Amino acid sequence: MSEPAPQSARRPGLALQAPRTQSAITSPTRISLRQINAFYGPKQALFDVNLEIPDNAVTAFIGASGCGKSTLLRCLNRMNDTIPGARVEGQILMDGVDVNGAEIDPVSVRSRIGMVFQKPSPFPMSIYDNVAYGPRTHKLTKSKADLDELVERSLRRAALWEEAKDRLDKSGLGLSGGQQQRLCIARALAVSPAVILMDEPCSALDPVATAHIEQLIEDLRKHTCIVIVTHSMAQAARISQITAFFNMGQLIETAPTDQLFTAPKVEQTQDYITGRFG
Amino acid sequence: MRTLSPAVKARYFRRQAADLIMSGLCIVAAIIGIIMLALILWMLFSKGLTGLSLDVFTKSMSSTGTGGGLANAIVGSLIQVGIGSMIGAPLGMMVGVYLSEVGKTSPFASVVRFVNDILLSAPSVLIGLFVYQIAVSPFGGFSGIAGALALALLAMPVVARTTEDILRLVPQAYRDGAIALGSRENEVVRKVILPAAFGGILTGILLAVARIAGETAPLIFTSLGNSNWSTDLTKPMASLPIAIYRYAGSPSADLVQLAWTGALLITVGVLLLNVVSRVSLAAVKRGQS
Amino acid sequence: METTAAKSLIGTRKPHLGDTTFHISLYVAGAIVVVVLASILLIMFLGGRQAFETFGVGFIWSTEWNAVTSIYGALPAITGTLITALLAICIAWPIGFGIAFFLTEICPRALRAPLGIAIELLAAIPSIVYGMWGFFVLAPFMAETVQPWLTEVFAWIPPLGDSFFWFSAPPLGVGLMTASLVLAVMILPFIAATTRDVMLSTPQLLKDGAYAMGATRWETLTGVVIPAVRGSLFGAVFLGLGRALGETMAVVFVIGNATRMPDSLYAPSASIASVVANNFPEAETGSIQLAALLGLGFILFVVSFGVLALARLLLRQERMA
């Protein structure tokens, strides 16, 4: 099906980060979105979105600001419930349960789905307490030793252990921006989420810290389903296996990442990735 | 070179003159105001310090008109202000949390916020009369606990207002982060928001303590004052402001002197509380921005 | 298999004890605030009902207050309250405004913060201190120096020589004029501090725009700052007025405590708050005098509620923004 796009249509910058060949996504679907419509008060932010999000892969949402990609991300863990006047219709099936169901407890959804925000925002407490926050809240460990171990494991998975192990009792706000963001990832990992949502996690970071986080995402996705919103097409191309392109609240096209960037089927996608708008 | 026409020049000078005159008047106003207030403070210190002695802190008020100290009034004030803050501060904190975290812009929250602002500056004499009617008159007499209750009602709106203001300074990211980790609403507030705002809330409580420590009018109607040593909360209880009020109007020079000393003590206490809370509040705000 | 595991984790909504208690206790706290205000109003009204029933609506208009004959009218106290509070505002506002303008635009930058804090600290001094100062310092000074001088200066104006606002009565020191001055000094730091906060809330960009067009400081103030924050400036004035109306201790020392209609600015008079504080010790439970005091309290409550509500409405634009 996929014809290669004419070379001239591609941005030279993108060619440098040529997508890896990985079009075959074999992992099973983790989350199915059926007919999602989202509203903020009278304004509709998402229109009839249908999407399958695979397990053990990174799915990237791209599109211009205000296209609805962040809104959709916040649907997945019911964060929109905290916004007065926000309303989400449709089904979000995770392991056969509609997590968007009115009868579902949003708190139980969020304890299964972790989230990392745009701005690194550790709580104003020690590094240890930041990571231990989730396990303590959900009473995941029985003893202090268990908790210590869980904190260490989470920090290791977030590639922060070596830098943080000697200052666990120091404030998380004393870390650098990139370290803070990895601390937030460790904080999310500590509750062993099935899915991790990332809302432009690198947009506040410098290139070195960004590379760090991207490597981390690549490692994490082997065991987790990751959904990432990014404004950077280059980043989507580098780290994701599936890319979904949004425009004006509509899901325009979903495809394996290399395919979407090399041979988009929809003209709008083509225009966007070649920089004709957005 | 283009030269300015005389009309333009004249207008320019008129505008400059107006600015200078008005600015001058403002400077004069500021000088008058500051001198006036400095005079009052100087007066307070010079008169109050002369009477300062150990007796003031060790002896109770005298009923004979000479000698004596303010010990029972100081202790009575500490007790009433202490109990008043212990009732008023938690209540005020809860109101502040309600306004900032739960009610937000809901109609009921708007009513509560509005009413709280009114209470914040309502005449304290009315709070005194009110507590007299509900806690003195029906129970057969003036009491220290009624005084504490009146002070609690005065402290509550102050704490509520500062708590709400401080909680609004807490970054939304902390709330989102805690919610995204699957925290219940009460956990978000108890484990993340309140600890983050602790310093600020504490300074708000200090400001409230400072405010009620100097209140006189409501105590006239509630704890009445007492010349004797008494720590019985069900009986009339002495307090510094009431002692000052009674002694300042007395014909005895000794007692007037004690009134000045008492006024100095209370002013220094209130100002110290204010300075401490302002300094720490500034630190808190710096830390969060 | 995984489905059942997930199902057991992703649960349905159930009432949560922690959140329920949390919500209920916060709503109760909020309700207490409203209930307190409502009960103050109700208690004052119920307590003062006897006075309103005995003297009718005339209670408000009657000028006689006589403990011997047990006839009580509120007008002298209302008059004293309004005159002292309004005069105090008229004196304190221009000075407070001047201080605020000085602190925001004229004062050297290094001095702004310390002077601003000093003003705020002065606003925190207990009012009884102002009362004592008024009684021991200002009142004698007024009686011996200021009032005789004013009498001399204004006595030559024939038609006004004896009328209310001029200065011919015996200079007693304590009275309306001194009380107004003490009140003015007391609310001055408060007005200066709130006005300064209001002025500071003007976006710097607006002011920069005006300065960039060559406006002077005064023109920037009148042309940009004041129009931008006019409502809040009035709000600050009304807040000060609310303070002055209900102030007890700064007034009770210096107003002279004579519950009769004042015939001059020198005359000893009384305010609602001072009448209540002064007469309360003699008022026995259940007496008509206590009812009259509570009735006065009710009137004061209604008046200050109105003033404060107006103040808050005017100030609110900034508050919820």
Image (cartoon, coloured by chain):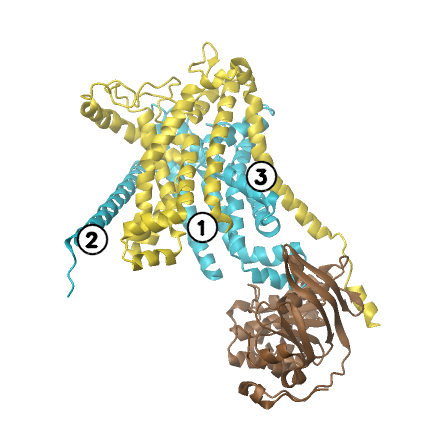
Chain colours: A brown, B cyan, C yellow
Within 10 Å of disc 2 (Cα), the crowding (few <14, some 14-19, many 20+) is few
**Residue placed under numbered mark 2 in the picture:** B12
Which quadrant is home to the C terminus of chain A? Answer: bottom right
Please tell me in which quadrant of the rendered image residue A192 appears: bottom right
- Relative to A107, say whether C250 is above or below: above
Q: Any mark on residue B165, and which?
A: none
Marks 2 and 3, Cα distance to the nearest angstrom? 56 Å
Extreme-right residue of the structure: C1
What amino acid is labelled 3 in the image? Answer: Val
Residue named by callout 3? C33
Marks 3, 1: nearer the viewer: 3
The numbered mark 2 sits on a residue in which chain? B
Position of C132 with respect to B93 (left or right) is left
Could you tell me which residue is drawn at 54 percent across and 21 percent down? C48
Q: Is residue B262 left or right of residue A183?
A: left
Amino acid residing under circle 1: Ser
Residue A33 lies in what quarter of the image? bottom right
Label placed on residue B277: 1
Q: Secondary structure at mark 2?
A: helix
